[in-house]
């Protein structure tokens, strides 16, 4: 059956797909060849053409965005931009508080909710001159029933969740960057489905205060972009000014993207997701691994090293461990929301709360011990390889409204190591992301690896 792309989109090809980039326009802004206002207007043209089909946006503040872009244009004309994100149109997942736009969490309980503050990430983006264009669609409270957004390359398909609107907006070239959140697969999975770059940094490396958090030991701020360079610039800028989560040192690395670096050795992970992956997706991924091997990257699997086999075996039950951690931690404030008006909480969230209610403190403590063991095993693998590579999802976004499986994302979310989705594969004429996983505080090194792999694969 033929795909049904949004207007202006055809069958997906990662080598020819045109995502927006921002960092390479800054010199044009300074020279007057281009302006932030003109850049914004081009984005608005795409939104006007595509968003009726993609439905990425919950709220747009177009007039205010034009004012921001005009002010940014003047700063560039004066040779005084505020930051690397000055003038950059950015979408904000509607789980992230904004002082000038509603924050409704896609939940009837919060209809009309207007925060009196920005999330710390938004505050510093605003201080840096970013053009905060609007709020993007999410699933209810980040974990509820599927939302209205569609995949830009086949609108019959899901864009994933819960950062659905953010990834769909970047994937359809409406904007060059967006913020999401991530507790299970909420950045990496939709980035895989929508053909964009997505970063789940080291746990705690990017301050998430002011964004909705259902499970504090799992939640991350996600950074989504049309280029890996903009992905890094956004993440590094926010962390430089907002810091990491309290008690965490923030994102290590330079302000500008690291130079591409060829990895010497990579571990190919099956994870619990390989058995759920369709044959076409397996073949596409295995073809990419052959490309890396042919380029001289040493590839290791569970068959080559007992330590890798032990890690794969231990983390195979990641769905079970993730559920224990998430369900136990989500009980507050969900209990209070249910007490207030249970009819406004979707069935999927109610079921999760009910499952969490049956967990004991002893079971949660045992889950924490298991996670600590996984982290130790993962750290030991850093001595063997430069990073790990696997799929971002067990296939492209499924047809229908179901968000798709996050099974490839659970172990990295539990452990908290950095992960990046690279838009390098096409299956059934729609995107399928390749996921890189690194080591704690090794976000910059992982980005350098991601730049090299992206350049090699897309130019081969």
Image (cartoon, rainbow, N blue to C red):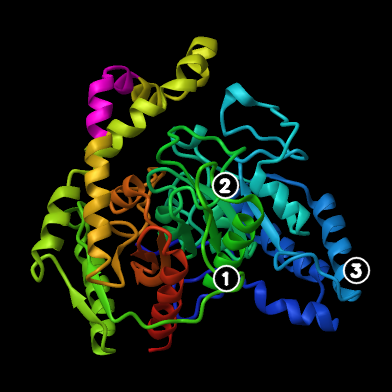
Q: On the rendered structure, is 37 left or right of 18?
A: right
- x%, y% of residue 447? 46, 70
Secondary element at image label 3: helix
> Mark 2 falls on what kind of element?
loop
Residue 353 higher or lower than 212, as above or below: above
The residue identified by callout 1 is 254
178 vs 437, left or right, is right
Q: Earlier in the sequence, mark 2 or mark 1?
A: 2
**Residue 127 visible:** yes
Q: Is residue 434 left or right of residue 45?
A: left
Classify the position of the C terminus by image quarter: bottom left
Q: Residues within 10 Å of mark 2 (few under 14, many from 20)?
A: many
Local crowd size for mark 3, using a 10 Å CA cut-off: few (<14), some (14–19), many (≥20): some
Which residue appears at 73% of the width and 61% of the height?
Answer: 44
Using a 10 Å C-alpha cutoff, classify the residue at mark 1 as few (fewer than 14 neighbours), some (14 to 19) or many (20 or more): few
Q: Is residue 359 visible?
A: no
Expressed as whole percent of the image width and height from the top left, the position of residue 138 reads 53, 41
Counting every numbered tag in the picture gives: 3
Residue at the top extreme? Answer: 339
Query: For residue 12, which quarter of the picture?
Result: bottom left
Provide the residue designation for mark 3.
74
Mark pair 3, 1: CA separation: 27 Å
Q: Which mark lies nearer to you, 3 or 1?
A: 1
- At 53% across and 47% down in the image, what residue appears? 149
Q: Which residue is mark 2?
A: 207
The answer to whether marks 3 and 2 mark residues whose Cβ atoms lie closer than 8 Å is no
Q: 152 or 281: nearer the eye? A: 281
């Amino acid at each position: 059956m033929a795909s049904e792309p949004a207007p202006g989109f055809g069958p997906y090809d990662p080598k020819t797909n045109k995502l927006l980039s921002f960092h390479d326009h800054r010199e044009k802004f300074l020279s007057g060849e281009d302006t932030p206002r003109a850049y914004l207007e081009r984005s608005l043209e795409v939104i006007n053409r595509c968003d009726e089909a993609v439905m990425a946006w919950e709220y747009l503040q177009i007039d205010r965005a034009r004012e921001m872009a005009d002010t940014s244009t003047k700063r560039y004309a004066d040779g005084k931009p505020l930051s690397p994100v000055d003038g950059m149109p950015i979408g904000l997942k509607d789980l992230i508080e904004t002082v000038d736009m509603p924050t409704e969490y896609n939940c009837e309980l919060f209809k009309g909710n207007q925060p009196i503050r920005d999330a710390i990430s938004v505050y510093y983006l605003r201080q840096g001159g970013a053009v905060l264009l609007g709020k993007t669609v999410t699933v209810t409270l980040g974990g509820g029933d599927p939302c209205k957004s569609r995949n830009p390359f086949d609108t019959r398909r899901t864009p994933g969740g819960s950062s659905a609107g953010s990834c769909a907006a970047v994937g359809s070239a409406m904007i060059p960057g967006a913020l999401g959140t991530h507790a299970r697969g909420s950045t990496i999975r939709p980035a895989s489905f929508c053909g964009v770059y997505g970063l789940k940094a080291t746990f705690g490396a990017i301050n998430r205060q002011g964004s909705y958090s259902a499970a504090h030991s799992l939640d991350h701020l996600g950074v989504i972009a049309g280029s890996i360079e903009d992905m890094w610039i956004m993440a590094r800028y926010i962390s430089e000014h907002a810091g990491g989560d309290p008690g965490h040192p923030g994102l290590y690395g330079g302000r500008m993207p690291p130079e591409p670096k060829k990895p010497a050795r990579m571990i190919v992970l099956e994870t619990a997701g390989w058995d759920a992956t369709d044959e076409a997706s397996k073949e596409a991924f295995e073809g990419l691994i052959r490309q890396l091997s042919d380029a001289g990257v040493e590839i290791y699997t569970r068959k080559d090293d007992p330590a890798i086999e032990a890690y794969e075996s231990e983390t195979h039950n990641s769905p079970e461990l993730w559920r224990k951690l998430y369900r136990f931690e989500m009980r507050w404030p969900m209990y209070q929301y249910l007490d207030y008006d249970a009819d406004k909480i979707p069935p999927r969230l109610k079921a999760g709360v009910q499952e969490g209610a049956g967990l004991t403190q002893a079971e949660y403590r045992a889950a924490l011990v298991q996670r600590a063991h996984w982290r130790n095993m993962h750290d030991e693998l850093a001595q063997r390889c430069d990073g790990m590579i696997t799929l971002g999802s067990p296939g492209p976004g499924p047809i229908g409204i179901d968000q798709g499986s996050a099974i490839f994302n659970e172990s990295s979310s539990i452990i908290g190591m950095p992960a990046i989705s690279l838009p390098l594969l096409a299956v059934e004429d729609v995107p399928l992301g390749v996921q890189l996983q690194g080591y704690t505080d090794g976000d910059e090194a992982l980005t350098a690896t991601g730049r090299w792999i992206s350049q090699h694969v897309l130019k081969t």
